[in-house]
Amino acid sequence: MAAAEVKVTEFQSRVYALLKQIPKGRVSTYAEMAKALASSPRAVGGALRVNPFAPEVPCHRIIQADGYVGGFKGEWQKAPSGVNQKMKIDILRDEGVQFDAKGMLLDKTSLWADFR
């Protein structure tokens, strides 16, 4: 039986293509992606929230413009469980990106915005 084809919008496709440009060990922001797409950070967040290609399309590499880790797997910021956010921090730490105990990016040189 063939795998079902995943349907995404043209905008989602553009978001996912940009995500794949972010190197391991680096992060970008919703705002930088929005700028590259001539869109809005909320629209980018909406596409990330429904990313059917994770982790190959690394939506975990997007954080807030202020350096805060932000949401993950559709869970926004400090949702009650915090499980998804901890998972995002753990994945990013494994890739070499460090956060403090409050979820703030420690090394601003980890930020990447060289979208093509």
Image: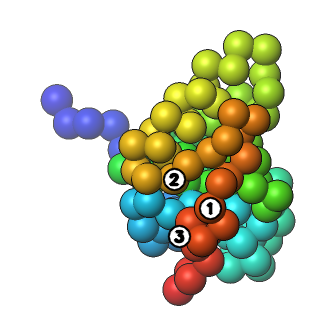
Q: Which mark is residue 107?
A: 1
Q: Specify the quadrant that holds the N terminus.
A: top left
Mark 1 Cα shell of 10 Å, populated few (<14), some (14-19), many (≥20): few
Give the mark nearer the N terminus: 1 vs 3.
3
Q: Residue at x 57, y 61 (%)?
A: 27
**What residue would you read off at disc 3?**
18
Residue sitting nearer the eye, 114 or 18: 114
Q: Nearer the viewer, mark 1 or mark 3?
A: 1
What secondary structure is marked by label 2? loop
**Mark 1–mark 3 distance (CA, rounded to whole Å):** 22 Å
State which quadrant residue 66 falls in: bottom right
Q: Please name the amino acid that badge 1 sits on.
A: Asp
Query: Which numbered dot is residue 6?
Result: none
Q: Residue at x 62, y 77 (%)?
A: 113
> In this rendering, would 79 be left or right of 94?
right
Mark 1 or mark 2, whichever is nearer to me: 1
Q: What residue sits 47% from the left and 43% below the top?
A: 93
Q: Residues within 10 Å of mark 2 (few under 14, many from 20)?
A: many
Q: CA distance from mark 1 to mark 2?
A: 8 Å
Locate residue 98, reporting x and y percent: 56, 49
Going by the numbered disc 2, the residue's amino acid type is: Val
Foreground disc of the pair 2, 3:
2
Q: Earlier in the sequence, mark 1 or mark 2?
A: 2
Q: Are the residues flagged by discs 1 and 2 in contact, CB closer than 8 Å? A: yes
In this view, 18 is above or below 76:
below
Q: On the image, numbered disc 2 is attached to which residue?
A: 97
